Image (cartoon, rainbow, N blue to C red):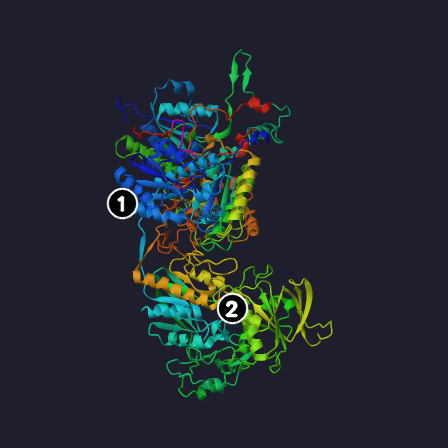
Amino acid sequence: MTSPANLPEERIGVYVCHCGSNIAGTVDVEDVAQWAAGRLKHRGVVIARDYKFMCSSLGQEMIEKDIKELGLTRVVVAACSPHLHENTFRTACKRAGLNPYLCELVSIREQVSWVHTDKVAATEKSKAVVSGGVERVLWHEPLEPLRVPIHPATLIVGGGIAGIQAALEIADGGSPVYIVEREPSIGGHMAQFDKTFPTLDCAACILTPRMVSVGTHPNITMLTWSEVTKVDGYVGNFTVTVCKKARYVNTDLCNGCAVCQDKCPKKIVDEVFEAGLGYRKAIYTPFAQAVPKFPVIDRENCTYFQKGTCRACEKFCPTGAIDFNQQDETITLQVGNIILATGYDLFDPRRIPHYGYGRLANVFTSLEFERLSNAAGPTNGKIVLRDGVTEPKSVGIIHCVGSRDRNYNNYCSVICCMQGLKFAHLVKERTGATVFNFYIDMRTAAKAYDEFYQRVLEEGTLFIRGRVAEVTDAARLHGEEGKLIIQVEDTLASKQRRIPVDMVILSAGLQPRRDAKAVAKLFGISCSADGWYIEKHPKLDPVATMTEGIFIAGCVQGPKDIPSTVVQGAAAAARVLGRIQQKEIALEPVRASINQDRCSGCRICNNLCPYSAILFHEDRMVSEVNPALCQGCGTCVAACPAGAISGTGFSNEQILAQLEGLLMLNLDGDGRMPVKVREAVAI
Amino acid sequence: MTEHEHFEPVIIGFTCNWCSYRAADLAGTARMKYPPNIRLIRLMCSGRLDPTFVLKALSAGADGVMITGCHPGECHYIEQNYKAMRRYQLLKRTLTQMGIEPQRVKLVWASAAEGARLTEEITKLVEEVRALGPLQWPTSLNGHGARPAVETTGAVVSAKEVAA
Amino acid sequence: MSENGAKPKFAMYWAAACGGCEIAVLNIHEKILDVDANFDVVFWPVAMDAKYKDVEAMPDESITLCLFNGAIRNSENEEMAHLLRRKSKILVAFGSCACEGCIPALANLTTPEAIFEAAYAGPTTDDGHDIRPQPEWAAPEGIMLHLPKFYRVVKTLDQVVPVDYTMPGCPPESHQIGAVVDLVIKALHGEADLPPAGAVIGAGGSTVCDECKRARNEKKINRFVRIQHVKPDPALCLLEQGILCSGPATRSGCTALCPAAGAPCVGCYGPAEGVLDYGARLMSAVASVIDSTQPEEIERILDGIPDPAGSFYRFNLGGSLLRAGKPAWSKQ
């Protein structure tokens, strides 16, 4: 058992909460308090009390009074989980003039009374937990939060609706915003959609005004056709390197007349915006309302770049804006906060071969259908088969493609039910075709969503509950020839069915971006095994991440519909604006630091930090932790072979002392610790 | 096993602040039940898990140790739980070589939503360790920390004993 | 200097040790003359004849400086530890065996039964008559002879008696011994202060890497190899080449002799300041930089360390938290 040098001067108060009967029903709280007062007296406990509700204002005042009147130097509260009330009791200590970090909250509710039934065992365990808390708090140090100034500019990565919303909120709030988008235009997936459920307003009609606002806002700097390549620094003070790819169009001269696009002789299938259903030129804007209006030259497909001749665009450009000599540009931005709104990729239904996508012509993905039904799309909104002319007489819409399926993704993609219903409505409205929806469960849980479902039901769309087994063109029965046959078990009728249709739409799920993990690494945040970015708290802090100063919004955090995406964009903006307004941020002082004399520069720790907080000084051959970058995980502390790294708030001494306390090594027969004092050496 | 009938093992559990400690919180909130033999220590991350803590626990009276953290790929500090995993795998080899039953030290991944899983794993470990019997590392064998009394007892073997 | 003008008394003793520490002391060359000039050597079994009873007859604390090397393997070792503690003002745990148990303490991984079996009945040591040391033997002269008791677990010196200083190394480097001798002599003349009680002396404050000249990078290990199986890059950190080098965890002071000679550090200078368990520190560090996230692949990489307990605790098992393998103390 080790004791800190200051043990004799310490005065500890122990406070055991009844939490009504939540704790007191299973733990003899009075016994725990009395025991602590007696058996832990030699460890500095001068007072131990139990109280009905320690977190109530009366309970807190009791602690404050004791701190002042009894001169407590440390406080242990045995109550609920620290995730609930650590802050409450720390604040109470602070009010009474005690450094908040000299307070330790140990849980005897979530970890004792609520999970155990044997009162004797629960009481004994509570004593051990209190004993651990007392030993730990003896090693606590008074700490001050780290204060970091916040640069007022914000970087938003991703120009979809989440990024647009966040950018406008922050810019309207008066702070500068950089928005980086990898495609030539902002707009994201929403710009590809036709109608939006459940109100059926046209996506372009509601989105384009916002895009224009972004493009013209004095506080917003748009960097499209650009990608972030490097992120340095920390909350309040990030240095971000952006690669602005060469557009080969001088944006100062270009007036967006699109003559170049007319004149360009090279036509390419547009796999991105038109989902492979339409064409674009080698010089292009993804769509007519693109923001910015400036086109880009796709080098891979440009005749001039590939063969050295053509230059049609240059010849016809009325403003002389074409510049084949443009080079990629590297820009460095200083920002205080970053919002990642990089969105999602559509699940690739080719991965489910038995649904026939890519093999059977008239099987469409949801994104393809969006383009098909879009008035500005390749068919001007005509819903036709792959031949481009035939209207389908019957359409099957398959839900949960790639979602809620152990073979692909376990999660629900949230939007596919409503998307399927929207498709059903559009098909019905535009073609009058018979529509079948194949679903597992219908999930229409949001404002006005279920009403929309009712509407589609009333329109006469047919619903079959069951996961589709197969889509095939192999006709077996009369009437199946030339059709796509959907084989499904109708689980409501307990029947196998074969439904012949002309067109199949796969309501495909959402997936993390294919480079989500690499991007997460670039920004130093964590993502789930699926690849969705992990929020700081799933309920109470859904747009913050574990990395201070980096926020997430929209589908990057998990599948969601447009309303929720917009909410998150705005929420992330609110968080950032709050930060900017405070001008500085107080960071938890749970940080690692390296004793420079003891560090041998072995470099074991150097690549253990995912936040690159550890830098190695080649000149002095020692490593050092940048406290503003450090997130306090303690991995380097545990790894340092020389024991030269210590972790404030989670030091070896604190953890080992808590361990000894939990194992009751601090008790001896007569309640006193054997203390061995060696006299100083003298000759 | 009769001698172990009344043996209540003491297990020290190391939890990470973001996943497994929250799983323990959840187990509580949902009133799930597990044996009171485990006592938890909250670390910020399983990456903070220093093998020293495990050795200290085993040498100081614990009969078993549970190390918990976020699932691989889901670490709140991005990838630190992998470091815990590597240390665990190496430590386990060393402990096995030292004659400590490998079942006594267990690594469990539990997300914040997996209160039930944590409950189940704790229950399982307590029963496994109960079946193994007490470890009760002699306190006289406690590194430099605890120096035994002047007279040496117990830990002596005479050559006669060996020859016998 | 003592009041009556007599020289301060010096003693050196070996318990369970190999004798290397003694040689290291003699290796301080002409400085040994300073020892002789400043001290009256009263007890040093390897260098002069003396009987235990002579030591017993000395007044308590009459020996100014006693360098005690060797681990506590048997009751004789322990008796001598107590005796010399009583008779000495300054007792130094000298060398790795006394400090950390060193190689003798690796026996703690096994049982005395197995040790005796190997020592007296192994294929190379069997005398054909299975003759084993007898703890008690009636001599023809009519007296009963006793052998010291063999302990189940080897101990370090500070586990049986309080120790004033520890001086690590297997053996301590001669230049470090020389420096300590100089310091003690200065202190005797009132020209210097002794370090605070309990300090580690004759060693540095960092770890071996601090003195190692090999180039170092960020570490990522995807295989462990044994030194005899590879031709290591002479200028690059050995650990980065997959050779298990204990340098990062081992206290500095040896001038990184082994890595300089192309061999990995084996850890004889023991843990760095404040470290509770040397092996745990080294295991934690080495495992942390394994370059894999797949359990199976990690196992495969770890297969490259065939004897983890022996590798991570080669010199330090006796001073470690567990101190011994379970079989050593549980007589099952």
> Which residue is the site of mark 2?
A451
Identify the main secondary structure in magenta: loop
Task: Return the residue nearer the eye: A635 or C256.
Answer: A635
Q: Magenta segment range?
A: A663-670
Mark 1 surroundings: few (<14), some (14-19) or many (≥20) residues within 10 A = few
Q: Is B27 located above or below residue A226 in the figure?
A: above
Which amino acid does the dot numbered 1 rest on? Gly
Q: Tell me the kind of residue under disc 2.
A: Glu
Circle 2 SS class: helix
- Up/down of A513 relative to C29, above or below: below
Query: Closer to the observer: label 1 or label 2?
Result: 2
Q: Nearer the viewer, residue A463 or C283?
A: A463
Position above or below: B10 against A335:
above
Q: Please name the residue that numbered disc 1 is placed on.
A: A97
Name the image quarter holding residue A440: bottom right
Give percent across and percent down for residue B84. Answer: 48, 48
Element type at marker 1? loop
